[in-house]
Amino acid sequence: MASPRVFDPTVVSHHAISSSRVGEVKFTLDGREVTAEAGEFLIAAAERAGVFIPRFCYHPRMKPVGMCRMCLVEVSGPRGATLQPACYIPVGEGMEVVTTSEKVRKAQDGVLEFLLVNHPLDCPVCDKGGECPLQDQTFAYGPGESRFVEEKRHWSKPIALSELVLLDRERCIQCGRCVRFALEIAGEAQIDFLGRGDQVEVNIFEDHSFTSYFSGNTIQICPVGALTSTPYRFGARPWDLEQVESTCTLCAFGCRAAVQSSANRVTRLIGIDSDPVNQSWLCDKGRFGYEAVNSEDRLTEPLVRRRGEGDREDLEPASWSEAISIVADRLSKILEEHGPPSIGVVGGARLSNEDAYAWAKLAKSIIGTDSVDAQLADGLRAEAVLGLPRATIDEACAARCVVVLSGDLREELPVLFLRLRGAVVEKGLRLIEVTPRPTALTPYATASILCRPGESARMVRALANGAVRPDSSVVSEDVWASALGALAGEGSAGGAQPTGDSGSAGGAGDAGGIVVVLGRPSLAEAGDLVVEAATSMAEAWPNALFLPALRRGNVMGALDMGLAPGILPGRVSLDDGRGWFTESWGSVPDGRGEGSSGILSSLAAGTMKALVLLGADPLGDFPDFKLAEEALENADFVVAVESFLSPSSECADVVLPAATVHERQGTTTNIEGRITRLGQKMVPPGQCRPDWMIAAELASALGGDLGFSTVAEIWDEIEKVAPSHAGITRAALDRPAARDGIVAPLVAFPVSIGRKDAPLRFDPMATPGIVAVEVQGAPLRAGQGGWEDGANGANGANGNGAQGRALPATSARPRTIAWPQAFEPVHVPSADSYSLRLVAPRKLYDDGVTIGACDSLVALSSSALLQVNRHDLDRIGVSSGEKVRLRSSRTSLEIEVLADDSIPRATAVVGFNLDAGDVPGAASLIDVTQPVVDVRMETL
Amino acid sequence: MALTEAPRILTSRIEQEDSHSLERYLATGGYAGLRKALSMTPEEVAAEVDAVSLLGRGGAGFPAGRKWSMLRQAPTTYLVVNGDESEPATFKDHLLLERDPHQLVEGCVICAYAIGAARVFLYVRGEFALGLERVQQAVNEAYSHGALGRDIFGSGFSLDLVVHPGAGAYICGEETALLESLEGKRGFPRIKPPYFPASIGLYGEPTVVNNVETLSNLPWVLVNGSEAFSKLGEGRSTGTRLFALSGHVKRPGVYEVEMVKTTFRDLVYAPLLGGGIPGGRDLKAFIPGGASAPWFGPDQIDLPLGQDEVAAQGSMLGSGSVIVMDSSTCVVRAAWRITRFFWRESCGQCTPCREGSGWLEKILRRIEDGRGREGDVDLLMDVCDNLAPGVSWPPQQTTICVLGPSIPSSIASGIRMFRDEFLVHVKDGRCPFG
């Protein structure tokens, strides 16, 4: 059997039809004159004109293939009227198209009869029944009965294509949507057609599974019940589902999705075609991560540590009032004895914007500590994230050149990977990556600049200044030259130079400029090294834009809301916002506090006393396991606001159960600063409460008052006090035009929603499954409760009509943070020749709490492996697959090693948040106080 | 041996034991056409070929000269040779590949020179083991002889030729499926537009796809000139053509005859050609141009072997395969055998062909097996109509390529000519031919 096809992005698809669109053309559609864009496909032009042409294989986000023949219409041409497939015939001037003639009707009838020849018609037991395009279109266009009387084709059914996707080949109508998705959109041809004629089947290749992180999309776009998911299979009937439009928050990309539920359990997520964001796709973690919401392991009541039998202290259920009063008492006492700086708050990226604002206000105003950090030393300094000029995702995809300095985006922000890959393949985007090891984007990069941890800043500075290739580089002259060429605009329009060369600013900033995707290539390398590199780029290319590639759910919203040291809501620094927020809030902290590393270090050293964990699990998810362990051991008091009992919350003194995604209202913010509405579909289990409510109760128990009692009131306050959010009122967010959200800061009103020819939302075939539910189930709601109390004025920054307290009267609205700022470069020690420099990248499926609570995903995470260049293995005489000892300044551990020659020599790659045996892999080795981590590999 | 005085253009050396060797080829005037071509400009060579009406011998009969002239101007141009001869009863390229591979190689080089191609891909049906071996040997010999490779015969023109074996799919004879297959992909015919590989072909570059027999004519045309070629035949159908004659004839085989001047009767009955029907039985029907062509009856046996002449009667000369069916033939069985072939070879891309072929096969089989139902004949015709609306010739298409719309040919012909025989099968519940 053949091996999977290797997709070569340099080979142009010959099925592609020129999509150059110049001007408009007029054509006749069923006797009516209609205008279309030149080059537009007939099926899309007709749909915009209100004529739905039935189809199966056509998908507006993929290239047409004309396979199913369902869209045949009569087109008059030089040879008279002939049947032509509307999905790939471009509209021509003066074309006469008839979609309802007897000839068309017979063709549609014929195709549907053919499709049903071998279709099992097992609709009563099929998941798709009730939302099935084959079913629907047979009713609308097909024959009443089949004349086929022979035995149908049989296959064993279903077969597992992967842990998540099952295939029933009898139901398959060979439209190729799944096969094309895998090849065209995901770039992973793991499924393909096998066989010939009516024995054609979709299948995986022998010894290969459909392991793509995007496999679930094939289920969403399957127009029959051939592809089903293990989590949803036989779980519900479509007409029993209710749904709400929401945003996935399992990473920070902000994919829009319809959340569907039945009997207060989330049953399914369907990607919504949000043109500027996910364009209907979801990753499998986002699609199936809802299992965590339904999990039996959810916390449902407050827990407090009590002395149990003997001397053991156990977490035992308590009432909310008891738990809150314990927390208030303990915190008050610590405040009294040690002052506000003795309390640290870690986490918050799991929260909604409103939750984050409430917690920021509680921490910074009522408790008075600035040691608050939503990032767990896995992100970037908040000033840089908030201060660098921001690109949107669309701007990145349309850039002259994108520089990716981040982790493997397919692992961290999977749909961003899809968007960038698509831009490279379809639009010729030039992409340069600077990375310590090859990533999923490497095959698509114009230049992939490999550099050892700690060297990226130097490398980027040389690149930004158009300098010669650094001597020590493992990068070839060719790669270096093509990177410089791409930055200079070679091979694309524009051709602007970095200022270092010509003195004239590049075209960056407009659609043709340079966009830098900025994240963390490795958690074993200090984030400030990336910030240093970004600073170099911002200085060399003053018009470059930056797209943060931070991955935690709502980390961008949390930073916007002030859950970071030295930051106040609205992207304002503590110093700049002191007057404004003192007037709004009553008080702000005196001085800058610590970030997560500083908080944990201070707790370990005993200089801080109490820790509040907001959905954070330092023991599992902080790069330095030893430091986290010492901090939690030494802390006098730990309170965890959590949905699950994580390793860290198990150590807490009080655990407060929080509502989670799909159970709360509010908004979330993605990497580009796009604020979208979260839909509440579920009632939180047990006594879980939204995080903002917990903050409000705690504030009150501490003798303060946050000043709001609904989510809506919180947003109104954010809109008023947070400078970056001025003008983004609830009413604005409720507008249909803001369905894709609003990017903060608001620069133009009204917001636009993507391009004119964007596929119709909820097109029954673009996102099958949605319309049927919408028609038969409950209507789609944007949200419920909280938001309905009065529409706000949407005109202007002051949001007149907003309730709550008035704007500060005397202070001026503070300016927002700008970057570059004066910045101390990080000193990277040189490595000795026996050491390997550690790279700790993120994996999509890790040992994190969410994956662990998803029955279908938990098996997909692997244990930690060490990957090194074969050369380094040979040096110690060990073979690939054997175990070695890996020693850092922190500890040593035994780990299986794999040779991977794509990794530069003297580099050791160990995936983060994966266990090696029964200890954390990378986190055991990392010392966050060091800029890089050097390890020794030894034989056992 | 032809009935007319026409010379043998394609088969002049095939009776020789060593006809495939370079030695024999050179001894019989081989590579003279190429030397002549190289002494001319590419434009002159193209003009020479365009001056004759060399209709493509692969099936569609598109004039070669015109095909070349449609090439999009681009730095890279490819010549692809279609040697994936796979239709039942079509076996004339098979002969050329095995018995005169140098003639083909020479034709390829002449064509590549004329169109400015730097690379030729010769796609040969994988089952032609001997043909592949002989062609590859000829290519190797041509390289060492200087007729391929760098600076051919000192002319400054360089060309590489790659022999690529097919993997057993009939559909890869469809030119766009062949290109996909060459590119290493599944052999799915490409959607049209773009209509011609001449604009977007192999690897997206302009490509000429010609048949083995078409190109094998070129050495003779270059040596003898376009006028000599044009004198043969009549109208658009000039030159000679190979016909693969099979079925109920005494002497099945490949015959080179002058076009138009020869008739189907000559082909079937002439003593030096088909030699007549064995046992003196009557002619029942014959297929003039391969399995996808509509059938003719005894009335049309005197039609000349000309492309337009056959087209005017509602069929095609197609791939040059003539299948004779005598009075002992069961037409239901014949239609079923042909339909079964197309069912097995449908690529599965388009719904009507994928599902229609199998359905038609099942209906025909049940009629032939005596399990036919009342109304089956009408059902057959209606399913055919859903595959090729109107069931006319040339067929209207509901599919990407013409494989699907060709399936109704044999069924519709059988029913049109022998409806009663179908009905008797159904009525009696058995095949009258046993």
Image (cartoon, coloured by chain):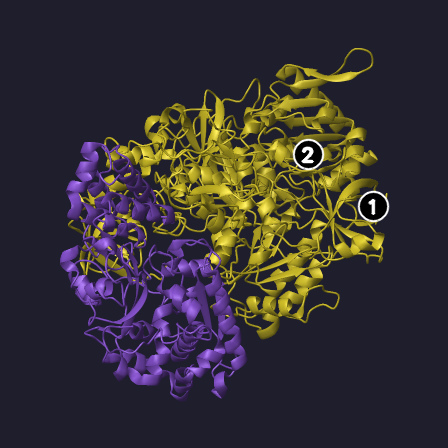
Chain colours: A yellow, B purple
Q: Residue at x 46, y 27 (%)?
A: A681
Q: Is residue A118 visible?
A: yes
Question: Which of these two is toward me, B12 or A445?
Answer: B12
Q: Quadrant of the N terminus of chain B?
A: bottom left
| Mark sitting earlier along the chain (1/2) | 2
Percent position of residue B380, x then y: 22, 41
Q: Is residue A280 visible?
A: no
Badge 1 amino acid: Ser
Q: Quadrant of residue A540?
A: bottom right
Q: Secondary structure at mark 2?
A: strand
Protein chain holding label 2? A
Percent position of residue A686, x then y: 56, 17
Q: Secondary structure at mark 1?
A: loop
Question: Which of these two is toward me, A260 or B369?
Answer: B369
Tell me, for residue A345, which label it has, or none. 2
Q: Residue at x 49, y 58 (%)?
A: B184
Q: Residue at x 46, y 48 (%)?
A: A746
What residue did someone put label 1 on? A888
Badge 2 amino acid: Val
What separation in Å lies between label 1 and label 2 (alpha carbons)? Answer: 29 Å
Percent position of residue A409, x then y: 59, 49
Same chain for mark 1 and mark 2? The answer is yes
Query: Is B89 placed left or right of A564 in the picture?
Result: left
